[in-house]
Image (cartoon, coloured by chain):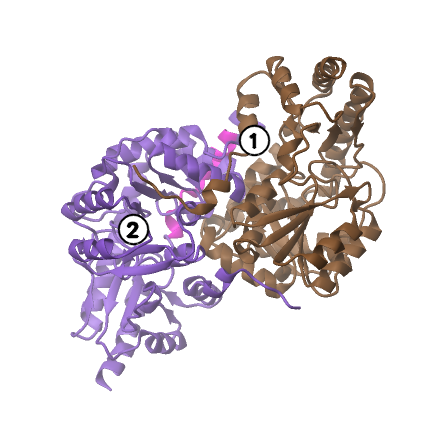
Chain colours: A brown, B purple
Amino acid sequence: MQIQFAKRMSNIKASEIRELLKVTEKEDVISFAGGLPAPELFPIEEINEINQIVLREFGAKALQYTTTEGYKPLREWIANRMNIQLGTSFDEDNILITHGSQQALDLSGKVFLDEGDVVLCESPTYLAAISAFKAYGCNFIEIPTDQDGMIMSALENVLEKTNNIKLIYVVPTFQNPTGKTWSMERRKQLAELSSKYNIIVIEDNPYGELRFEGKPLPSINSFDTKGYTLCTGSFSKIFCPGFRIGWIAGDKSIIQKYVLVKQGTDLQCNTIAQMIIAEYLKQYDIDKHIERIVEVYKRRKDIAIECIELYFPENIKFTNPEGGLFTWVELPENISAREILDKCLERKIAFVPGDSFFPNRKMENTLRINYSNMPEDKIRIGLKTIGEVINQYVKS
Amino acid sequence: MQIQFAKRMSNIKASEIRELLKVTEKEDVISFAGGLPAPELFPIEEINEINQIVLREFGAKALQYTTTEGYKPLREWIANRMNIQLGTSFDEDNILITHGSQQALDLSGKVFLDEGDVVLCESPTYLAAISAFKAYGCNFIEIPTDQDGMIMSALENVLEKTNNIKLIYVVPTFQNPTGKTWSMERRKQLAELSSKYNIIVIEDNPYGELRFEGKPLPSINSFDTKGYTLCTGSFSKIFCPGFRIGWIAGDKSIIQKYVLVKQGTDLQCNTIAQMIIAEYLKQYDIDKHIERIVEVYKRRKDIAIECIELYFPENIKFTNPEGGLFTWVELPENISAREILDKCLERKIAFVPGDSFFPNRKMENTLRINYSNMPEDKIRIGLKTIGEVINQYVKS
């Protein structure tokens, strides 16, 4: 065979996490690798019950084609929720239902990116956003961050000097992979800069509902008077990921473009999955459900941090997130997290080496720890083992 | 706002069908517009029962993330089914589960098409394939067809003379929009030409299971000794479209590229939807279910043809399909199907004007009639009305 693939295919590599997931699923390993929510918290009984109600009430409509935009009562709920929690001013026509927030990123690439365009992002940033955007032939410029988020002087410096910037991609709340959260001030400043330079911001927010402490912060979109900020959201972390239901929200004229693009991409999302979520939100108290999730994850996070303090060497840095699924560890500069991973995999422990999260500069001494998917005893055993392995490298 | 969208956005227009669907859903219209399956044939009770079984048996696994490739038992069933029905030689690793066969087309564009590449297609061809591929900046060359499918001399002529051909896109069985079916000979010939010129064939097959008469024909892939043919398939027309479960099948090395691309696009398809279909296929007789669908659609098709013969003017051409959802009508050359549609919409009857199905040359005197979604009495009333309107134009 002599097959000519599209040029983009040379940029598209297997997601390390998805590949690691295959390993971790197969064997009896303790995995800090995925971003998997805890399955014991999925509302299985409720979904079973609601499924029956939806089929009884809506019958064949729940199984038929529907509009690309998505199920209206669900879009109404999302708009209302965002307005209350994030300070936005949306109605259902600001919302498009997508196959998880991952598809919201893919569609963003399709709507905005030409080959050679530039995407600005936090350094490090969400690995699968890199692959989603890369498929459209863009380049990345990484903007440094501190404990309050992206450093605005560095961002403005790049905005001034660079042509073809199309998107600024950020995860301002409980960032993947670092767990960091942007301050109010930085959110305001980013909204201002995006207006000043006419650049679209993609504000990815799949974890925002999972806050362990501190006050909720408004979305960047809430400070955006011109409509340059688009926000993603997802039911994967507060309901279940298997349904593949997320969304993108923003200015109506832009969302209409997304709708057009989704039509040609896959027509629409699963009809009954949308209806089941909408009906669940009507019949059950999602806040109570989220409280339960947060309680479990906070405890797991606390144990993870305790273990890192206890078992990891002293000369490392790590984040103590206010919410979400991840903490981020920086080892001494000469140490490779990939080597650590190889040793850990031999002992059936997995995590993701941090270099995958940098589109350009690869900090090989970093790693991401997911704490949401393992029970407490396994977190202890697993992090103790990782600590032992790291200590061997630090000492040798 | 000064927003710069990607260049591709200037090529992406609203799908006329999806827009028409909005009209037809709202009002009490008789619609021959969509490609909607008959909802009264969806296995609602069975889905309800199986959903409970799946949640009981697999629990949280049915709601968690899973592999990008898709649920293994479902991929096994598909491979086996294709081997029996279509003469292919697949196993589960030849199959990727997609969000309907529409996503299989989108991913095909992503895997193969660079800007300026050429896609060859039947003239006319499936409208949403045009939009799926156009998003990747390709151009189309339409190859004429006769009653046996694409005319091979015309195809070879173009293959010889044209640079940058990347894909040949065909719907060889009960084509959308014409309802035509390719002969065995043409299938063989296309497989040979694709090997000779090293060009990938996308064989779109969402309707193949819905045969009213005549003998099933093997897939183009079954004649392809080199692996250039990729086949799509879908549960939308034999189970239900709301689940958004289809697939793409082909050479393993190519399917692996699709898997990589799907990872960055939306991670995976709905976990429980895949499990429900697999479990349904285990517990129920899908052939019996398809028989029931075929029986209803054949009767509706017969009535549609009878009405066209009875109420449409004599100097028109139309197809009498051996299966699938559509018949295609060619009016005298000076008549615009769009004008007819406007008049029909006033009388609450809808269909799709045929010019949308041509990427380049627009035959305005054509229209597509879907007969699967309306009960028999409405088919009679609707086609009688369309016939009356056409007659006014033909006579005037």
Q: CA distance from mark 1 to mark 2?
A: 33 Å
Tell me the quarter of the image containing the N terminus of chain A. Answer: top left
In the picture shown, does residue A65 fall above or below A359? below
Q: Nearer the viewer, residue A142 or B138?
A: A142
Magenta stretch in the rendered image: B38-54
In the picture shown, does residue B332 fall above or below B207? below
In the picture shown, does residue B74 fall above or below B98? above
Q: Is the residue at mark 1 from the same chain as the one at mark 2?
A: no
Which x, y percent locates residue B238?
Answer: 35, 44
Instruction: From the image, give the main secondary structure of the stretch colored magenta.
Output: helix
As shown in the figure, which amino acid type bears the numbered disc 2?
Answer: Ile
Q: Nearer the viewer, residue B298 or A299?
A: A299
In the image, is A177 to the left or to the right of B336?
right
Q: Mark 1 highlights which residue?
A: A16
Which x, y percent locates residue B330?
Answer: 23, 69
Which x, y percent locates residue B336?
Answer: 30, 77
As shown in the figure, which amino acid type bears the numbered disc 1?
Answer: Glu
Secondary structure found at label 2: strand
Q: For mark 2, does the 10 Å Cα neighbourhood hold few (<14), some (14 to 19), or many (20 or more) residues?
A: many
Secondary structure found at label 1: helix
Which mark is drawn over residue A273? Answer: none
Q: Chain of mark 2?
A: B
Tell me the quarter of the image containing the C terminus of chain A. Answer: top right
One can see residue B13 in this view:
no
Q: Nearer the viewer, residue B185 or B323?
A: B185
Residue drawn at the location 42% of the way across and 45% of the way down: B111
In the image, is B260 to the left or to the right of A160?
left
